[in-house]
Amino acid sequence: MGRLAAASLVGTAIEFFDFFVYGTAAALVLGPLFFPTFSPAAGTLAAFGTFAIGFLSRPLGSVVFGHVGDRHGRRPVLFASLLLTGGATVAVGCVPTYDSIGVAAPALLLVLRFLQGLGLGGEWGGAVLLTAEHAPAGRRALWASFPQIGPAVGFLLANGVMLALTAGLDHADFRSWGWRVPFWAAGLLAAAGLALRSSLAETPQFEALAAEGRQASAPLAEVVRGHWRLVLLTAGALAVGYAVFYTVSTWALAYGTERLGVPSTVMLTCVMAAVAVKGALTPVFALLGDRYGRRTLCLAGCAASALWMFPMVALLHTGRPLPMFLGFLGSLLAFMAMFAVVAAYLPELYEPRVRCTGAAVGYNLAGVLGGALTPIVATAVSDGGSPGPPWGVAAYLTVVALVSLGCFALLPETLPARAEPAERECAPA
């Protein structure tokens, strides 16, 4: 289990490094380089628009790779998704700017960001199921939480590199070539991840399905026909997690640097410190999920998110490092109370034959609802020129949290003692 968990963590860290480094670049530099004819605010919105494309393609990736995972095994998904995301990320670092090739530059960004999202949409299902289906039932949330630490590690790597570059290079060099370095580094990380994953074994549950010839012939059709309500509920339930995380990690960077005049190094440091604490506490939340239930932790995280959004915005608006860090930390801890256990929760909600498709589609559809639109909406509602805090952002996030709370309330609990009978009930005759 230790080796499997490590391989899943490293793989998701690499793929989320690829995904997050784009978000950081969108907040800091892509607007003026690829949309120079726009105003600063409009350029940021346009850059976040290309950022959103990666979320729109993630559900498609979960369908494509989910089909592979349910038909041919979880293991092939881990290789194909990492290759696709890594290749697209390296290519982003090679795209000429608008000054060199005109409108073809943002068009290429859109295509490559789409491919990034496609690969990441498959990565989550494969990595999570690799650990969840090997793990003992009583510690399933704990072991399955290790892939959920990967996004925090990927974020810290991406932003650590960006922080070092912005601190070590002058503004002209960073805009000229420095921002491209993290994208080029993705190629080396992808090669290391592929080497680590080469020795992983297929999961026992899929091997049992394959031995009996019970794989789903059309996983998506089965999910749509038999589990459509579950997919929609899980997507709505998880939307708040994406909204909160990308408000902190992407929109807040742009707001702090552009509207408050906070140096980008200070903003990155505050966000990175909060993400580091969140990542370190992920196994603790997972252990609580193994003891008290997955749904219980998710309801608590949603409620905390709804209560914390206005304080978070007020603390951000101070522009001072410590209050901003505390605002970000409270938001991310509420987020992690949910996302530390969903890697066990979502697979337990689906029968094994369609688990890779169903869990991944619900998870990545939530990314569209909560992650793709949030930086755009937040930028739009905070661009009124008011000197006060952007309360519209807090109101928007609070509404999303309340909707997610209602969705979680309609989902069942899946602690192992209750999950196994539920799986038998929904299994085909």
Image (spheres, rainbow, N blue to C red):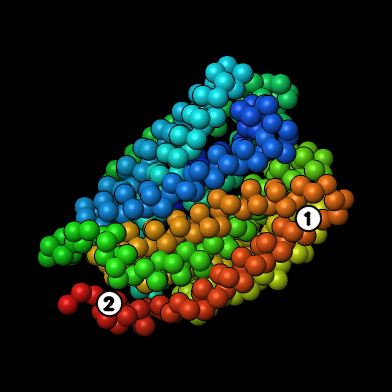
Q: Quadrant of the C terminus?
A: bottom left
Secondary structure beneath dot 1 equals: loop
Q: Which residue is mark 2?
A: 426
Which of disc 2 and disc 1 is earlier in sequence?
1
Q: Residue at x 36, y 44 (%)?
A: 81
Q: Vertical placement of 143 versus 425: above or below?
A: above
Q: How many marks?
A: 2
**Residue drawn at x 45%, y 40% as measured from the top left:** 114
Answer above or below: position of 296 versus 330: below
Residue drawn where x is 73% and y is 25% of the image: 171
- Dividing the picture into quarters, in which one does residue 415 lie? bottom left
Mark 1 neighbour class, 10 Å CA radius: few under 14, some 14 to 19, many 20 or more: many
Give the residue type that dot 2 points to: Cys
Q: Quadrant of the N terminus?
A: bottom left
Residue density around tag 2, few if under 14, some if 14–19, many if 20 or more, within 10 Å: few
The residue that disc 1 covers is 390
280 left or right of 350?
A: right
Q: Secondary structure at mark 2?
A: helix
- Rendered image: mark on residue 98: none
Q: Position of residue 78 (x, y in %)?
A: 33, 47
Residue found farthest to the left: 212
Position in image of residue 428 (x %, y %): 20, 74
Please say whether residue 362 is visible from this viewpoint.
Answer: yes
Q: Is residue 200 visible?
A: no
Q: Quadrant of residue 424?
A: bottom left
| Direction top: furthest residue | 100
Rendered position, 201 above or below 47: below
Q: Residue at x 49, y 59 (%)?
A: 366
Q: Is residue 392 left or right of residue 207?
A: right
Horizontal side of residue 134 vs 211, given as left or right: right
Cα–Cα gap, marks 1 and 2: 46 Å
